[in-house]
């Protein structure tokens, strides 16, 4: 076993072919990549193979540097038909929200500066008034996601005290977020009432003590309870809580300002009706049915929101300027009553079966492909088992997995789904500006 034929790091660095790498990536990172490539070469020699030539070392180094410098967070075309696709970034932003992010990112901003007073301001003002106007709440507060909203509420309002929750609402959502674990982290004591399938108002009443700080109602979001089941209505829980002067926190998870039933889906409790039912604090996500950036939004009683705002944890979970810019722009769509026309999530939900059929047929003619009836889903832990009718573009390649692998490695990766041996493309979730790239990629694959 001999390493004498391996070039030194300096020999590689000083070689003529390596100069392009040095000018492209810089000497420090190029040197690190050369050392890593030489380590691989020594492993090759230990396995009994000959030492690679310097040209192979440089080629390996170039490939390594290319991998290191290739972004991992890149745009993709969502052709799955899952509208709020958690793995693909959830809600795409509206054009106004994109411009607002660009504006906030491209220079300085009034994030914490009051122009009229010429003094320091507060970042929470940027979305609060819009949220108050839209929901009718007394106050609002924005954090970086809904898990943080729940954690902040429990920590600020119920630390070292008891929080009552129905066993049927001890949910787990994607990424391992579990309500009991969050409650434990907050320092609140979990008090489970009822059974897995049935909870009565008396179960809540009998659990009340002088240490009860909150009653927590959690929307099921990503599953349904069917069969022999019951849960007390929010209004009934609120009436009981008001007798005892105990706040009610409603965690809606996704949260919507529009009625999903108007689009042929099941009814998702709206933020406005949850507040109207008497919930003292309502929390929900910004990047699901709202159609904005990742955020956790709290609306409700002014005194309770003020306690959260002043809590030390609030600073740790606060949103940045890009989030607030995108969220404010998204909320303005609702205030102008243009969400169906401007917010991509609602454009997709509202797309008619005829519109999707026509779009898919045009694609099929261009690609010499089939169409078939199918179903889209909302996703994002919203409206479980609810679907929307669509028309799918269907391909029947000999090797469906290889076909989808090629789609994923396109210049703009395409994420499709496979059913019954066919590769399916759902036009509902393909954004208009990505349509041509989708068709070009599919055409090239057919010609290959």
Image (cartoon, rainbow, N blue to C red):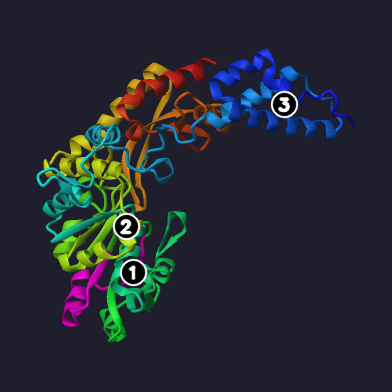
Q: Position of residue 30 (x, y in %)?
A: 61, 27
Q: Nearer the viewer, residue 400 or 251?
A: 251
Q: Is residue 144 shown above or below 192? A: above
**Crowd tier of the residue under label 1, counting other residues whose Cα lies within 10 Å: few below 14, some 14–19, many 20 or above:** many
Q: Picture coordinates of residue 423 (x, y %)?
A: 48, 32
Q: Is residue 328 above or below residue 132?
A: above
Q: CA distance from mark 3 to mark 1?
A: 55 Å
Which quarter of the image is occupied by the C terminus?
A: top right
Of residues 131 and 403, the one nearer the viewer is 131
Q: Residue at x 45, y 36 (%)?
A: 73
Q: Residue furthest front?
A: 118
Q: Residue at x 11, y 47 (%)?
A: 117
Residue highlighted by disc 3 = 9
Q: Assess disc 3: are there few (<14), some (14-19) or many (≥20) residues with their C-alpha within 10 Å of its C-alpha.
A: some
Mark 2 or mark 1, which is nearer to you? Answer: 2
Q: Position of residue 164 (x, y in %)?
A: 32, 76
The reply, left or right, for residue 423 in relation to residue 228 is: right
């Amino acid at each position: 076993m001999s390493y004498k034929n391996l070039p030194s790091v300096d020999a590689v660095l000083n070689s003529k072919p390596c100069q392009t790498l040095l000018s492209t990536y810089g000497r420090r990172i190029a040197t690190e990549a050369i050392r890593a490539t030489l380590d691989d070469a020594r492993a090759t020699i230990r396995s009994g193979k000959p030492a690679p030539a310097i040209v192979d070392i440089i080629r390996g180094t170039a490939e390594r540097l290319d991998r290191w410098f290739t972004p991992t967070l890149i745009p993709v075309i969502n052709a799955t038909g899952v509208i709020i696709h958690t793995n693909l970034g959830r809600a795409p932003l509206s054009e106004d929200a994109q411009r607002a992010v660009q504006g906030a990112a491209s220079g300085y901003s009034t994030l914490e500066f009051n122009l009229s007073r010429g003094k320091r301001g507060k970042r929470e003002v940027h979305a609060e008034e819009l949220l108050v106007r839209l929901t009718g709440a007394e106050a609002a507060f924005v954090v970086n996601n809904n898990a943080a909203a729940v954690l902040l509420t429990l920590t600020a309002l119920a630390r070292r005290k008891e929080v009552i929750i129905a066993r049927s609402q001890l949910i787990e959502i994607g990424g391992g977020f579990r309500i009991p674990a969050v409650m434990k982290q907050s320092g609140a004591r979990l008090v489970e009432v009822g059974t897995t399938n049935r909870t009565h108002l008396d179960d809540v009443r009998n659990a009340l003590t002088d240490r009860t700080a909150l009653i927590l109602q959690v929307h099921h979001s990503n599953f349904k309870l069917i069969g022999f089941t019951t849960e007390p209505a929010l209004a009934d829980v609120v009436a009981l809580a008001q007798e005892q002067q105990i706040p009610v926190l409603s965690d809606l998870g996704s949260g919507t300002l529009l009625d999903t039933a108007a689009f042929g889906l099941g009814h998702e409790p709206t933020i406005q009706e949850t507040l109207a039912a008497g919930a003292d604090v309502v929390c929900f996500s910004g990047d699901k049915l709202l159609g904005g950036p990742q955020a956790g939004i709290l609306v409700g009683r002014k005194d309770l929101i003020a306690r959260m705002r002043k809590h030390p944890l609030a600073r740790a979970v606060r949103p940045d300027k890009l989030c607030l810019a995108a969220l404010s722009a998204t909320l303005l769509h609702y205030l102008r009553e243009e969400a169906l026309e401007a917010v991509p999530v609602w454009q997709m939900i509202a797309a008619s079966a005829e519109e999707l059929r026509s779009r898919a047929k045009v694609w099929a003619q261009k690609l010499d492909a089939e169409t078939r009836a199918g179903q889209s889903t909302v996703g994002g832990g919203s409206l479980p088992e609810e679907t929307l009718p669509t028309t799918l573009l269907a391909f029947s390649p000999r090797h469906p997995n290889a076909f989808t692998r090629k789609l994923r490695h396109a210049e703009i990766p395409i994420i499709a789904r496979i059913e019954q041996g066919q590769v399916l493309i759902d036009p509902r979730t393909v954004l208009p500006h990505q349509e041509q790239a989708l068709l070009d990629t599919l055409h090239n694959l057919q010609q290959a």
